[in-house]
Amino acid sequence: MAFQWQIDPRDLFVERYPQMVGTGLPQADVDTTRAAITDMWLDGPGGWVHEWSTLAGGYAATGQHRLAALAYGWAKFPTLADESKRAALSEQADQYLLAAPDFGLDFTRLTVEAPYRGVRIDVPVHLLTPPGWSAADPVLLASGGVDSWKIDLHSLFADLALRTGMRVLAFDIPGTGETPVPMSADGGYGVVRAIIDRARTLGNGRVAHLGISMGGWFSARSGLAAEVDAAIVLGGPIERAFDPDRTWAYGMRGIIGNALGFDTEPTDAELAQRMSPFTLRQWLDRDWNAPMLVLNGADDVHIPAADTLVFEDRRDIEVHLLPDTGHCAITKLPEATRIMVDWLVSTTAW
């Protein structure tokens, strides 16, 4: 189930340009692609998928497979709303596997079997193992959000693995990427719980959980319920982000609608009804959370600052609201990464 919706590609470049160049694409190539794109859904020259795929194909032809995977990642961005975007995701996965020998750590692609509303599904995941890691060490579970997925965030996940010495198990949250079921507060979290259980078999049994953006909802849920041993929430929605009268910026309304499994653009009332079960208030009202790190940018247009600050003054939770940066502190990602690395090293010394 998927749908297209009215969105100006210029708006996406306004918000995501720092992420595009910050994850490794040459700025000149991003600028050229930006100038060529005139339409989000056009299947041809000037279309989003076509122009990003042209850039990716050029990288692939010269053996620059990591850059090709990044560019195909932007081709399928922000959601798999049509066949051309699904094809771009397939190309991204192929180029990513070709790039794997140069990752600087051991890479394994495997599947996790998970329950979802009475059936069993297979979820493809990526295991990144740094040099020197042993089975006596913990595992870091990691995911992105509704539009930036495990391959898109490889550089961050690999950096965390190398700097902390932890094995990283990367996955796509339900409703996105290669996870084949819609996002939901009940069945969707059940899928993540199965991935947590699998992660416990891949190291010393201890698991930390990093979630970015909507992935941060899942890590907040697992951390507040103490279903993991430690949790990091980077830019995650908690409760105020699910207010029924909230506004949506930069195409997020359609992105969320696709992740939730709508096959046509939902009304505000339909979207609010589907999202209302996601509030974590019932878990905030309890007091058995695992150690947690919660951080975000103070200028986030998607997630209210209250969804970060609500964790202040709770036991075993460290909170950072970084000034002069937006969603997930993307323009200050090196600072945010340093905070996460320091916290992981000190907290997971089990």
Image (cartoon, rainbow, N blue to C red):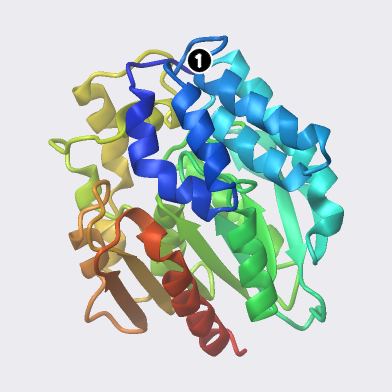
Which amino acid type is marked by label 1?
A: Gly
Q: Report if residue 70 is visible in the image.
A: yes
Q: Find residue 291 and report its image quarter.
A: bottom left
- How many numbered discs sit on the rendered protein? 1
Location of residue 106 with respect to 162 vertically, above or below: above
Front in this rendered view, residue 72 or 138: 72
Q: Is the C terminus in the top left, top right, bottom left or bottom right quadrant?
A: bottom right
Residue 343, position as x, y percentages in the image:
48, 82
Front in this rendered view, residue 281 or 179: 179
Location of residue 348 with respect to 48 vertically, above or below: below
| Left or right: 179 in relation to 306 | right
Element type at mark 1: loop
Question: What residue occupies the far left of the structure in this picture?
Answer: 245
Location of residue 127 with respect to 92 vertically, above or below: below
Q: Report if residue 236 is visible in the image.
A: no
Q: Find residue 328 and report its image quarter.
A: bottom left
Front in this rendered view, residue 21 or 76: 21
Residue beneath disc 1: 46
Residue 214, position as x, y percentages in the image:
41, 48
Residue for point 23% across, 35% down: 248
Question: What residue occupies the far right of the structure in this picture?
Answer: 101
Location of residue 59 with respect to 82 vertically, above or below: below
Residue for point 58% across, 45% down: 172
Residue 94, position as x, y percentages in the image:
79, 35
Residue for point 45% across, 56% down: 212
Residue for point 75% across, 73% down: 203
